[in-house]
Amino acid sequence: MPGLRIPELDGHDAAHRGRTSGFLMIRVRGLCKNFGGFRALDDLNLDVEPGQVLGLLGPNGAGKTTTVRVLTTLLAPDAGEVTVAGHSVRTDPESVRLSIGLSGQYAAVDEKLTGYENLVMVGRLYGMNRKSSAARAVELLDEFRLSDVAGKRAGAYSGGMRRRLDLAGAIVARPEVVVLDEPTTGLDPRGRLDTWAVISSLVGAGTTVLLTTQYLEEADQLADNIAVIDSGRVIAEGTADELKSRVGSERIDVVAAQSEGVDRAAAILARIASGAPEIDRSARKVSVAAPDGHHMLVRALGELEHEGVQVVEATLRRPTLDDVFLQLTGQRAQEQAAPAPSNATATGTSQDHEVLKA
Amino acid sequence: MSSLNAAIRDSSVIAERNLRNVIRTPGAMVTSVAQPVMFVLLLAFVFGGTLGGDQYRTFLIGGILAQTLTFNASFTAVYLAKDLQLGLIDRFRSLPMSRGAVILGRSTADLVTSLLSIAVTLMCGLAIGWRINNGLGPALLALGLLLLFTFAVSWVGAVIALTARSVEVAQSLGLIWLFPVTFISGAFVSVQSMPGPLRAFAEWNPVTAVATAVRELFGNAAPQGFAAPSGWPADNALLYAALCCAAIIAVFAPLAISQYVRISKR
Ligand SMILES: Nc1ncnc2c1ncn2[C@@H]1O[C@H](COP(=O)(O)OP(=O)(O)OP(=O)(O)O)[C@@H](O)[C@H]1O
Ligand SMILES: [Mg+2]
């Protein structure tokens, strides 16, 4: 697993930090944050090189928003060293604020102001003059497909429009570092794609981005590096490919037409592939690791046909981040319970798959 | 110097934004207009007859002004708490803007609401027989004092909002203190009529000082039956009122700003 860092195994100063020399746009070392007796961040470490996108992935309550709030100077850390664009959030928060743009988890827009007025206000507060903040507002409204509603009060916007307006606010001043807390939550597919395009163009322009997300596909699409966090700690870190290779080989998913077919399909797959298949009865789905994917899928389909098991869908896919995520966060909890085959199967999207419809 | 410029610019951006909000929330304006009208009519005609008729009506206006402007602190509290609740304060705190600007912009915008309240109160006053008897100069000074006072109390409103953190709590916290503070005062009656401790409180109450100073500047005498107040605050009402405003700002402005800076560091 080249380059993949597993903190429990190799400590904090892994070799991958040596991949590039020099300056880190975001540098977090030993960050701790307690709320009363509760430890929300527990010795968290993050690195983001200039111009890179770090995806912060984690279940609810993992500490994503808390991390974002510390990075954006909204929350003081209890311990640890946090620098953004070379400035310490502790000793030089003013310079940090000049270097960042934030879009928080919940869109913070002034509902009584129009979309245009909201953006002009933010521009002015970044120190831009009237003229350039007005020009920038028009530009961004266009970029975020809000031109039509630019003159309407934000209170009348849909959730997705609000979200986009908030996101536009984060990049008004073209900051060096943009921090986005679940930027596409609540967006429709088109809004999500638009947002991805905007983030990609930011990266193209050299902006450093830290984004948190619940969507594994999003991290996969956008992030150069992904840090999976749970209970306030980084539990895995690496590129999407590195994380996926950690789960192992390609997988075959088979969905049976009838529920009676599920067990027979599982038996066939167990015979062909290596390892015990995962069974999701409610979805009538059987999933198995397939080291020699292509051939195994062809064989599996042949035998399923031969034994008369009707199949609705058969998929050969690379492991998704869902698989990684489940393995890292879910399975750890299950380990202590029972080693029985899990019948929870990853749902969600996978990019690199071939779908054969029966 | 440039940081002062930045502070002024940031505050004016926020003030402009707040004014747009106020103008676009007609419901909130109704309160700041209707409340002084209601109190003028209520006190002038329900209590007025017993307390001195026409003379009481003239006397009343200074008191209503002091009371209404004190109540406007609750607007500051509610608006600011709303910004906090909506996450706008978080957005502002992540921007490279000066630390006091959000609250200063708030109090500045609330001055405009207060001007509206003042205008409405004086109009009602004119309708029930109140007049400026001392000339324009002192009357303008009275207006200045009223604006200073409302500016001062809006910092109290800010501290309430930042302590309350939610609109609901800010609403109730922002209101309860107003009744004792405005009624245990010389706003509507002679403080001489009150029993010992209440009287001492009323004599030194800034609301009394503002009401008294404004009456003096407008040349509005107390009704004949009212015992003339005595003591240093009564004898130096204008000076004492201005000192009170300065003291309120000196205590509550730094408190509000330090709360603002730490607001999410629970
Ligand atoms: N102000 C606070 N006071 C007390 N506890 C808090 C506070 N903020 C966060 N927490 C707790 O810290 C933990 C991490 O919260 P955080 O909001 O960072 O999670 P998250 O990863 O952003 O989750 P989500 O995906 O739900 O947004 C949670 O258990 C949360 O309850
Ligand atoms: Mg969150």
Image: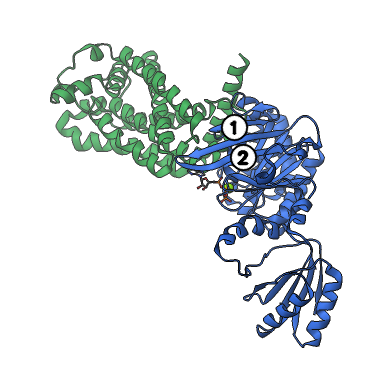
Q: Dividing the picture into quarters, in which one does residue B141 lie?
A: top left
Give neighbour class at mark 2: few <14, some 14-19, many 20+ (Cα, 10 Å): many
| Residue B197, placed above or below residue A317 | above
**Which SS class for mark 1?**
strand
Amino acid type at mark 2 = Leu
**Chain in green?**
B
Tell me which numbered mark, 2 or 1, is placed earlier along the sequence: 2
Direction from residue B169 to residue B187 in the image, left or right: left
| Residue B155, placed above or below residue A178 | above
Residues at circles 2 and 1 in contact by the CB criterion of under 8 Å? yes
- The tag on residue A46 is none
Q: Residue at x 65, y 59 (%)?
A: A326
Q: Is residue B46 visible?
A: yes
Location of the C terminus of chain A (image quadrant): bottom right
Direction from residue A351 to residue B191 in the image, left or right: left
Residue B92, percent from left and from top: 57, 34
Q: Residue at x 55, y 39 (%)?
A: B88
Residue A10, percent from left and from top: 70, 42
The residue closer to the viewer here, B229 or A58, is: A58
The residue indicated by pointer 1 is A80
Residue A83, percent from left and from top: 66, 30
The residue indicated by pointer 2 is A44
**Chain in blue?**
A
